[in-house]
């Protein structure tokens, strides 16, 4: 049966018929830290996160060092009960590894795709679902913003977020249980180490572009991509040519990075609450 496309508030939904929606099941793993609970995590919890089929925040939880307000907030959000997370950016590899292992042990058969995002990432989940509805979660594949360096066949920018198929997650778990795989459990660059580990089990990045070869995932903010404020490292790392102005980003963009809490709310408002319409009737009469 052909797909029926319905556009609602600027977001496209796809149906097999009027009663059944085709939608891959997505689990969102959102990395944060206590100092960001009341700012970044709060903004994400009140904007895009609830659109995931399931989402959990992955964080260290030093209750004895937290304020009463922070503790109260954590009681209102889903936090993955992962023990032993070491705080600090230099331990982001460990936090990401533990997040994926937790997802495997608790959600492997419940979801098709598993996406890791930082607490300054904005995700448009409807676009992510549309993109993934055309992919096969039984294949050992990942998607994100592609870098062409360091790791064989490249790797994904961690800040832009990246998504693992169910089969990729299964192989990632196997790799970490295999003493011969040499998968790092901590240190190094998180996105590089995750990719290195996946390569040991034959998992490779897929093409994350739209039909006009525009990027879906973005390692910088919209403003930086739009104006072409590209750091030197991105010019060297990017697999695809960098574009500016309206060609910078796909009409079905999935992610932006370095998004402040205020910008999270702004993007959410423009995407889901502001609905431009016009009731102005043009007059056909001409003055005499």
Image: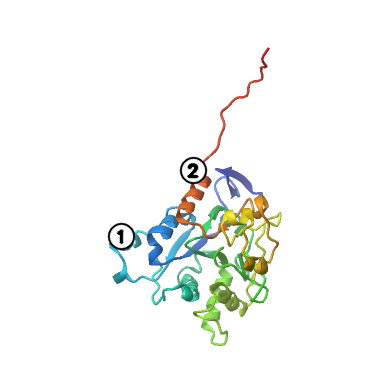
Residue carrying label 1: 69
Asked whether residue 129 appears in the rendered view, the answer is: no
Q: Residues within 10 Å of mark 2 (few under 14, many from 20)?
A: few
Q: Quadrant of residue 280?
A: top right
Q: Quadrant of residue 55?
A: bottom left
Q: At numbered mark 2, what does the secondary structure look like: helix, strand or loop?
A: loop
Q: Give residue 67's position: percent from left, percent from top.
A: 30, 64
Q: State whether residue 117 is above or below residue 83.
A: above
Q: Determine whether, in the image, residue 140 is placed left or right of residue 270.
A: right
Q: State whether residue 4 is above or below residue 69.
A: above
Q: Residue at x 67, y 76 (%)?
A: 152
Q: Give residue 158's position: percent from left, percent from top.
A: 55, 67
Which disc, if any, is residue 140? none
Asked whether residue 100 appears in the rendered view, the answer is: yes
Number of numbered callouts drawn: 2
Q: Residue at x 55, y 43 (%)?
A: 9
Q: Give residue 220's position: percent from left, percent from top.
A: 57, 60
In the image as oriented, which residue stretches furthest toward the top? 288
Q: CA distance from mark 2 to mark 1?
A: 29 Å
Choose between 5 and 95: the one closer to the eye.
95
Choose between 69 and 137: the one closer to the eye.
69
Quadrant position of the C terminus in the picture: top right
Choose between 76 and 241: the one closer to the eye.
241
Residue carrying label 2: 273
Q: Give residue 109's position: percent from left, percent from top.
A: 51, 67
The label nearer to you, 2 versus 1, is 1
Q: Residues within 10 Å of mark 1 (few under 14, many from 20)?
A: few
Q: Quadrant of residue 85?
A: bottom left
């Amino acid at each position: 049966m052909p797909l029926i496309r319905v556009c609602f508030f600027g977001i496209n939904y796809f149906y097999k018929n009027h009663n059944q929606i085709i939608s891959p099941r997505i689990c969102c793993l959102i990395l944060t830290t206590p100092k960001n609970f009341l700012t970044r995590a709060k903004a994400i919890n009140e904007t895009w996160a609830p659109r995931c089929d399931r989402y959990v925040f992955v964080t260290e939880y030093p209750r004895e060092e937290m304020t009463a307000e922070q503790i109260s907030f954590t009681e209102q959000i889903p936090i993955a009960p992962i023990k032993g997370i070491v705080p600090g950016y230099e331990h982001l590899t460990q936090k990401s590894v533990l997040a994926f292992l937790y997802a495997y042990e608790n959600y492997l058969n419940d979801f098709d795709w598993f996406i890791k995002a930082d607490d300054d990432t904005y995700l448009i989940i409807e676009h992510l679902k549309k993109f993934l509805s055309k992919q096969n979660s039984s294949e050992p594949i990942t998607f994100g913003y592609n870098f062409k360096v360091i790791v064989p066949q490249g790797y994904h920018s961690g800040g832009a977020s990246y998504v693992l198929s169910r089969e990729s997650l299964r192989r990632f778990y196997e790799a970490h249980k295999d003493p011969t795989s040499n998968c790092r459990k901590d240190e190094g660059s998180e996105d590089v180490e995750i990719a290195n580990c996946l390569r040991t089990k034959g998992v490779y990045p897929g093409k994350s572009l739209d039909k006009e070869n525009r990027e879906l995932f973005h390692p910088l903010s919209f403003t930086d991509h739009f104006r072409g404020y590209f750091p030197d490292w991105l010019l060297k790392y990017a697999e695809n040519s960098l574009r500016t102005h309206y060609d910078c980003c796909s009409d079905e963009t999935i992610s932006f990075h370095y998004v402040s809490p205020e910008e999270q709310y702004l993007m959410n408002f423009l995407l889901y609450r502001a609905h431009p319409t016009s009731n102005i009737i043009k007059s056909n009469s001409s003055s005499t």
